[in-house]
Image: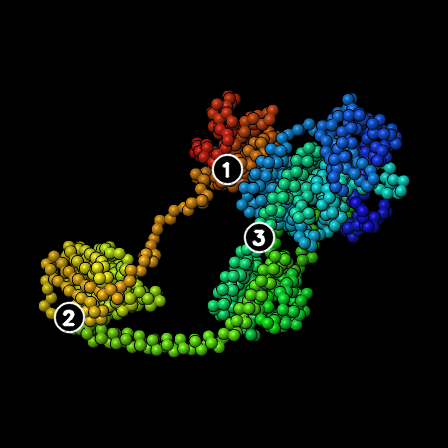
Amino acid sequence: MATNLKPVLPGDLIDLTNCDREPIHQLGAIQPIGFLLALNQHWIVERASANLHDFLGITLAEAIGEPLGALIGDTAVHSFRNRVAMLRGADAVERIFGCSLRDDMRAFDIALHVSGDQIVIEGEPAAGEHGDATNTVRSMILRLDQTADLPRFFNEGARLVRGLTGYDRVMVYRFSQDGSGEVVAEAVKPGIGSFKGLHYPATDIPAQARELYRRNLLRIITDVDATPVPVHPALDPRGRPLDLSLSILRSVSPIHIEYLKNMGVRASMSISIMVDDQLWGLFACHHYSPMSPSFERRSVCELFAQMFSMRLESRERKDLVEFERRARDISDQLLGAVASDETLLNDPDWLGSILTSAIPADGVGVWINGSHAFWGQTPNAEQFRRIVTQLNEVSDGRVLATDRIGDVVPGGESFSSSAAGMLAIPISRQARDFVVLFRAEMIRSVSWGGDPHKPMEYGPNGPRLTPRQSFAEWKELVEGRAKAFTPSELRVAETLRATLIEVVLRMADEAQRLRQAANERQELLIAELNHRVRNILGVIRGLIRQSKPHDGSLESFVKLVDGRIHALARAHNQITDDHWGPAPLHALIDAEAAAFLAEGPTRIRTHGDFVLLNPQAYSTMALVIHELVTNSAKYGSLSDSGTVDIDWRRSPAGDLLVDWVEQGGPAVVPPTRKGFGTTIVDRSVPYDLGGEARIEYLPAGVRAYFRIPARHVHDGGEDRTPTIKFPRPALGHPVAPPTQVLGGQRVLLVEDSLIIALDAEDVLERLGADRVTTAATVDAALEALDVFEPTLAMLDINLGDRTSYPVADALDARGIPFLFASGYGEQAQLPEQHGGRSVVQKPYTIENVARALDQLLTSVR
């Protein structure tokens, strides 16, 4: 890799002031887990690592200057030549697993690449794993594809890498545009704390390191205390060091070693996540003891990371397309609403809600003709005035966005606690009126991943070389800044600006006509209101004058008038709820029944199709039904244990025929005098509506008949009144687990298959387990007992060439309930000590695991 970085000279003190120019790709050494040979174009050895004898039994003096064929067998040389011929691209690396260099030598895993004009060969002792990499990665990708959103996608990626490699901590680390980063997901072993949510300044991963991550997708450090092995000679005849940018064994920067030591990390691995050919982030793996996954397993991780990157790129593009589509829909909705109602621009709740649905923000300010309105978290009125004044000076009529208001508004940093970033959308031709979206200061949106003030011991390269101190430095770097607005959000804002201006101009042209039309409508409404008020006052006056109680008491008079006026009020409410339009007949009857028969409204039974009455007929029938219900409650069937049936139907001519039938009450005696109530029943429908009315006082009960002319009646289609329905789950909704049998439980799962273990974890979590820790080996499970302290365990019987019985013994000794799992199910042969234990048959399902664990917990209660 060509570089113009100034090298750090041997006598220089390595600290953060020169970290960005440290030549980390030219350190001239490798890690001691393998060896390195550098050949010229004639396949003559020109350089070699000092530990060559440890692996090949050849000294440096015996190797340098010799043809490769003199050191290893012809078969291996032929294989190497073929692989070098297959290299395509400047950053290509070829791999050979289990390669035999000579008959008298153990096998090696080999990596080959070209560095400048030299061929670099690196080797590690072969692990001999030879797993099914294709199916492993395919299964891992299937699990990724089943995640519902990006946070779950990141978490699942971290879980899968940790399950594959066994590192104590695996993080998904995402870079921002300014080079700083954030831990967006992690999978950790219990008891070691969390880094999730922590942010780090760009200096934690210098620019040249990010460039190497882009070129060389996987980087491993097996032991921070290991002594680097030098490559000899350090310089070629032209004085150039060996460029180890693509090396799999390259030694480590002392600054990075110090950083890891200050965290207590003894081994690490980083795998690049590339999106659109750019470094999106890393899988960052930490281990608290030396750790050296095989070259073959690291290659599987690299392949998974490439597939992960492709899936991530696809999801981000899909999310971006969906975001812009949804934003356009929201924009259309906003524009359509504002076009019909200009006052919505002054409604901060409505405008803030719809704008932040299109472009995420913490607050919205609107400035129109010197007036302002706010929604959410914004500067105060005086600060907003200063912002608008400055915008009018610097705005050129286009959208203006900044992640630090202080860069645009002098003194703007003083109110960064209220709003640090803004996106200003001009909504007038001369850019005097604005809609401004505000975003909060970035550090106020961050969750701490742990106590930032936790005391720690620092190394010789300074106290800043720890993640929590990095977080503190990141805070200092972003104070007064907000999350930047993305190019996609700016495109949406430009669309809003153009269309809003068009709508505002059109509304300005029509303003005079609209005001005139509004004045005419207002005069009409006032006249209509005066007419209706006079009519209502006349009706009330007549009710008062005609409502003479039989006993002449004031109390009876008030009660009688009050009931009739309330009947009118209930009818009026129903009519106005329907915007002075037709209202349903059965709603009127229901209201009267509820008013007079609170303890038994079902004693009034209705039968008939859904019909609507116009306002005049509805008010008239309200008084008629009120009088019938009142009289029945005093003297008729409703005064005793009887019932009333109200039936209605349409005649062939379209008139509405209504029958009132009382039954089951006391014997009816015709009245000796005709009061105002009887007059309402007899004469209201004929007089007010031009219909017919008839009432009969039969001994078995009062009967009344009414005919309401068709011009007062509407079918109305389906019943529009709300009804109560029993809730039922909608099709396609997830089905809940059989029962939350594991609430409050900490479960130890022992399972040696990664994919099966992940499925079992999901089942246990769905069953309500508070925490689940997985172990793949007996040793790991026994260690988890001390750290995790489970309350319940599920043990796969067969763990490779061992069984989980030692774990069962330990659980039994501690009194922790557990059960076994096996593909043999209940036919599994258990030792005598555990002969009575339950065995869950694989594959795990939520039903069989729930049933078995429920029985287990019931038996120990």
For label 3, the residue is: 321
For label 1, the residue is: 763
Q: Mark 1 or 3 closer to N-term?
A: 3
Which residue is outermost to the front?
Answer: 653
Amino acid bearing label 1: Val
Q: CA distance from mark 2 to mark 1?
A: 76 Å
- Residue 62: quadrant of the picture: top right
Question: Looking at the rendering, in which quadrant would you find the N terminus?
Answer: top right
- Front-lying residue, 641 or 508: 508
**Position of residue 93 measured from the top left corner of the image (x, y, whole percent):** 74, 37
- Front-lying residue, 77 or 198: 77
Q: CA distance from mark 1 to mark 3?
A: 34 Å
Q: CA distance from mark 2 to mark 3?
A: 74 Å
Q: Which element carries disc 3, helix, strand or loop?
A: helix
For label 2, the residue is: 675
Image label count: 3
